Image: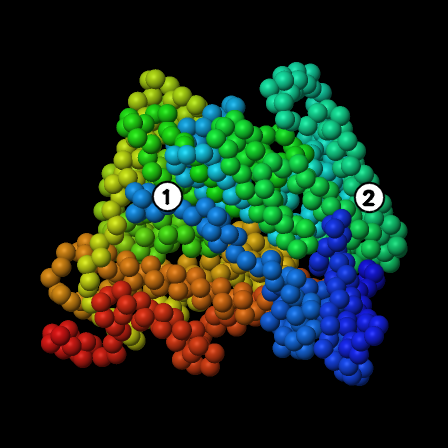
Amino acid sequence: VASKPYTASLVKDPGRNYYSIKFRHPRRYTADGKPGLNVRRGLGTADEREARHLVAQMDQILADASLWSPVARDDAAKRFHPKIVDAFYDGLKADLTDPAQVRDRLLPLPGRDEGYRKVLLVGTFGTGKTTLLRQILGTDPDTERFPATSANRTTTAKLEVVLHEGPFRAVATFLHRDEVRQYVEECLVEAALARLGEGTDDEVARRLLEHRDQRFRLSHILGTLPTKTSKFVKAFDGGAATDRAARRDATAKEPDAPTDAEREAMRKTLRGFIDRIRAITEAWREHAGGMQADVETDELKQRYEEQLSDLPDFETLVNDVCAEIARRFTDLPGDVETDRDGWPTLWKFESSDRPDFMRAVGRLTGNHERHFGRLLSPLVEGIRVFGPFRPRWRDNDAAPRLVLIDGEGLGHRVEAISSVPTSVARRFGEVDVILLVDTARQPMQTAPSNAVKTIVSAGYESRLMVCFTHLDLVEGDNLPDDQAKMNHVLYALTNLLDKVGQDVDQAAEQALERCLQGRVFFAAHLNRLGLPAEDDLTRVNLNNLIDAIEDVAEPDQTELRLYYLEHKLPLGVQAGLKTYHQTWRALLGLEARPDVPKEHWARIKAMTRHIGYLGKDEYFHLKPAANLVDRLIQQISRYLDKPHRWEPRDVDDEVRQAAIGRVKNKVYTGLLDLSRDLMIARRSSDWQAAYGFSGAGSSVKRAQAVRQILEAAAPPTEDPYGAGGEDIFATIQGIVSEAVHEVGGGGRLVNDPIVASDMAGTA
Ligand SMILES: Nc1nc2c(ncn2[C@@H]2O[C@H](COP(=O)(O)OP(=O)(O)OP(=O)(O)O)[C@@H](O)[C@H]2O)c(=O)[nH]1
Ligand SMILES: [Mg+2]
């Protein structure tokens, strides 16, 4: 039951011999935001048969939704005439520009030359990264609230702030329309599934207004419905009066917030969406229900999900929600640029008036409930802000010259799959300091520990600093004072060092221990505007932190020739690949492992979609590419820590470790690129096919398909040089050998230990 089919037709301009093709494009948008833009292209031929043949090719593309994405262009190019490929993909191609480059072009980041230091904040969700950023900016948590903080998964865009004299300036880039559409569709599917499972309207609303992965919150954009009931909690009738009082109070202080009338209008729209979800679901149940009386609920949900996106009413609903979103851009202050289909790509704003600027930027970064219904934060891909910010507690008069980079938090408790997002990992090499922000309440849990292991394995330990927040909330009868609390946290840090020693190696542990000296900081009450006068500890620690950042030296660049035994490398790579595939088989439910729980089929499905159609390399905590890089770099790091020889021979440990660190940096970047290429770029059609399974048993088939993709990308094999294995081992060997050669001043991988020693002796 496909929705209205898209087809192409042949036209001939009056008075001309040449034919043109005409079609409605399913992924380009008309002025009112609906898909189906009319496209007309000359075919460059007067031969009717040839022209008809080309039109038939376009019909094939139009019939296959898996081809409707910019990433499918390469695939299509293999099957169809270039004229047809251009006609379909040209409009989509324009959107592939890297948003980071756009921000760089309009507001380039200052570097070391101008005395600036770049600091990348990493840490688990809700540990206080953005709160610390606020402290360094000196923004007011009550009136300015910039940037937004909250309990969990608050920062979703790439956020870069530069402490810079002059006017306030900002550049923001937005998520691509296809991505937004995808999230909207996923929210609607979740809501419909909740409805199918006899959920109340409140539950349906909850699913609709907050995406399952908590990254895309429609409530911020479209407003909320008061949801009170849940099957999990007993109804409770107190508190409403105080709620209302608080709300009235807040309205008074928020002149820009939607008025009560506006809020009511938004609620009406939302209720309309929820009614339509109900109608679509009931109609499907009636139509399909009779035949499926004997089907398990999970199976029924799966069938419903698969059929939903083909229901015309559902597609119209998705379109209407997207159109509602697009309307929210209309009264944005500043300059907005759009792509050729009218979707905003870029926002620019400049003002010397601080409140004015904060109000504008709040639209794109805020999370205040009073502003729900006019916030665009979930649509922002990245935002860069320059302004004369300065910390209120700084002893020194001059504002520190800092670029602060905040972004998506780390998270996931399952050790085997907890990786730093690749978008964060890629920035390790660009920054001067990697500041791990962690909470003193539960210090160094899985995600931050794994991040530290990766940072050390990738040779970035000399850039690492750690700040523990929430010291005020560490409580216990055994912890009478700050010193006792800090010792409690430091104990966790010592454990972490041990773990690095075990999981990577002794050299890494020692390097880390050396690098962290004087680089661990503590803070309490970061969420307050003025640090309490008696809180000397935080004031001193924060000042020390800024001093340490300003003092951070460029890593030692002394040239050292490093020689490694070539034949030892594959052993580690093989071990890394083996555990990687074991982990993923367990995640996919194809093999049982005590330490890796099976992932829900719906998440696996969503992952295949995000990778196949949006060109992402991860979905939620599922990070096949980052996991692979983590496994490999830990093994390779261990290998690189033990050069067979080095020259000159008599250098300090630190010089040697710095040289090895530079090799690791290069290898790490190489592996990030490699995994993206092998697993994502070259295999988008395989991911699309994996997504496409439907009908009985589709989730098992999909799991098998994902396994095949991963194994084809990085073949696990007992014999590294056997069939299939050769490719990846050779490539990795190439990456390592190139890094050793370039960074180590002409060192290399050598085959024969004796030759290696000889050469070192005579060179
Ligand atoms: N009591 C106390 N609360 C803090 C402290 N630091 C941060 N918080 C609170 O912790 C919560 C989370 O802080 P955020 O700064 O939003 O955390 P984040 O690391 O940016 O989180 P994500 O953006 O979700 O990754 C907020 O409610 C802060 O007010 C602190 O030192 N003490
Ligand atoms: Mg944050």
Q: Which residue is mark 2?
A: 276
Left or right position of 498 against 87? left
In what element is the residue under mark 2? helix
Mark 1 falls on what kind of element?
strand
Which one is in front, 85 or 644? 85
Mark 2 neighbour density, 10 Å: few (under 14) some (14–19) many (20 or more)? some
The front one of 35 and 289 is: 35
Q: Which amino acid is tagged 2?
A: Arg
Horizontal and vertical percent position of residue 314: 79, 51
* 2 and 1 marks in contact (CB < 8 Å): no
The numbered disc on residue 747 is none
| Colour scheme of the picture | rainbow
Vertical relation: 185 (above or below) 390: below
Where 243 falls versus 30 (above or below)?
above
Q: Position of residue 284 (x, y in %)?
A: 84, 52
Relative to residue 141, is residue 723 depicted above or below?
below
**What residue is shown at x 72% (from left), y 47% (from top)?**
322
Residue 458 visible in the snapshot: yes
> Which residue is rendered at x = 84% and y = 72% of the image?
14
488 horizontally vs 722: left or right: left
**Towards the viewer: 385 or 122:** 385
What's the CA distance linking mark 2 and mark 1?
A: 47 Å
Q: Which mark is residue 119?
A: 1
Mark 2 vs 1, N-terminal side: 1
The residue at 67%/34% (across/down) is: 373
Count of labels in the image: 2
